Amino acid sequence: MKCKFMLSSSSTKNILMLLICSSTLTFAARPFITDDPGINEPGKFEFMAACDFWKDHATPSLQLRHGLTERMDFGINVGYTAAPKEEQQFSTVDFNMKLALIKDILTLGVSTTFGKPDYYIYSILGKAFGPIMVDANLGYSARAETKDADFVYYAAAIYENDHFGFGPEFGGDQEKLEWWAFGGRWHIKNWLTYDIGIGGNFKKNIKFNITTGIDMVFPQEKSKTIHERS
């Protein structure tokens, strides 16, 4: 889920909340905040359940995505602040859409929050160098009818094969680098992935965040019988 808090070096709390909410999945490439340019197949659903936590916070969240066409998918997200106790509440609902401009290379994403004037527009670039996939997100996060806006970027380099993937990522805004992380994912089945990652900011008193979750794709095609394959 991608929350639309502004990345501002003067607000550590907002930065942390942005990162906690981001790591579930407006961006689909969990456990990374950095998204990849892939689009869900038409007719396919993708369900993601995740939790971001550290000693002083815990935020479980859910997302459901659906492939609309070969070049477009749509997602809806919701989360819940479980800790600290005094801040317990459900988040507002986020809606997001991805449009592939150049399939598997360049994608445009748009995200907004129901009932709020916040929005996030970003481009997603992806390029494979052998088994290493490099993804970069460049975006503009803003609040309508105000001057509250930021240029936001994320980048990740991920070693990937049929069984697992892992790597580092970095992110920030126009002022400075704000975020680092290292994560990995295990492809248990072709429709099921488990992931875990840890990240933090670059301040002297680091604000850490652990994220973990599952990603499921359905419906699955039934295996053909020997007679059908022949």
Image: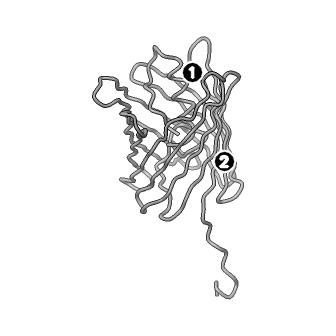
From the viewer's side, name the closer residue of 90 and 25.
90
Where's the C terminus, which quadrant? bottom right
Q: How is the image coloured?
A: one colour
What's the residue at 63%, 21% (across, down)? 86
- Residue type at the position of mark 1: Asn
Say if 9 sits above or below 171 in the image.
above
Q: Position of residue 6 (x, y in %)?
A: 43, 25
Circle 2 crowding by C-alpha within 10 Å: few under 14, some 14–19, many from 20: some
Residue holding disc 2: 214
Is label 2 or label 1 in front? Answer: 2
Where residue 125 appears, x then y in whole percent?
A: 43, 44
Q: Residue furthest top?
A: 204
At mark 2, the secondary structure is strand
Q: Residue at x 58, y 42 (%)?
A: 158
Q: Amino acid at mark 2?
A: Ile
Q: Residue at x 37, y 28 (%)?
A: 151
171 or 19, nearer to the observer: 19
For image coordinates 62% across by 38% down, the residue present is: 167
Q: Is residue 168 above or below residue 10?
A: below
Q: Position of residue 2 (x, y in %)?
A: 49, 37
Q: Residue 159: name its quadrant.
A: top right
Left/right of residue 136 with respect to residue 204 in the rendered view? left
Vertical position of residue 220 compared to residue 200: above or below: below
What label sits on residue 218 in the rendered view? none
Picture layout, residue 77 above or below residue 221 = above
Q: Which mark is residue 201?
A: 1
Q: Earlier in the sequence, mark 2 or mark 1?
A: 1
Query: Relative to 55, is 42 on the left or the right?
Result: left
Q: CA distance from mark 2 to mark 1?
A: 24 Å
Query: Counting other residues with Cα less than 10 Å from the Cα at mark 1, is it few (<14), some (14-19), or many (20 or more)?
Result: many
